[in-house]
Amino acid sequence: MLIEVKSKKTPTLSFKPDYLGRLQAYADVLQMPLLIAWKYHGIWTLFEARHLTKAKKNFNIRYEAAIKESLLGILAGMSPIR
């Protein structure tokens, strides 16, 4: 799997379409999933890039949504928050 690592102090993570497109194209060529690891206030989430949604210009995810989609609980043997 490919993991793009980010750290932000705001509750929204944002990717410009061309940047996300290049990351996804690379993942597609390698036939690997693209995951995003995001640290916000010292807490990590790990989620699939497909959970980013198109806003006006960029693809965004709010921290609350990232927590709900985080794969870290699954990796630790826990169920995701729903």
Image: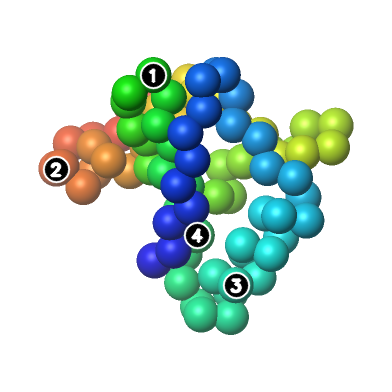
- From mark 4 to mark 2, how far is it between C-alphas? 21 Å
Residue 68, image x and y in percent?
Answer: 41, 29
Element assignment for label 2: loop
Element assignment for label 1: loop
Label 1 Cα neighbours within 10 Å, binned few <14 / some 14-19 / many ≥20: few
In the rendered image, the vertical position of residue 19 relative to residue 13, given as above or below: below
Q: Earlier in the sequence, mark 1 or mark 2?
A: 1
Q: State the residue in front, 79 or 55.
A: 55
- From mark 3 to mark 2, how far is it between C-alphas? 29 Å
Query: Which labelled disc corresponds to residue 77?
Result: 2
Tag 4 residue: 34
Residue 76 can be seen, yes or no: yes
Tag 1 residue: 41
Q: Residue furthest left?
A: 77
Residue 47 can be seen, yes or no: no
* Quadrant into which the C terminus falls: top left
Tag 3 residue: 26
33 sits left or right of 59 in the view: left
Closer to viewer: mark 4 or mark 2:
4
Q: Earlier in the sequence, mark 1 or mark 3?
A: 3
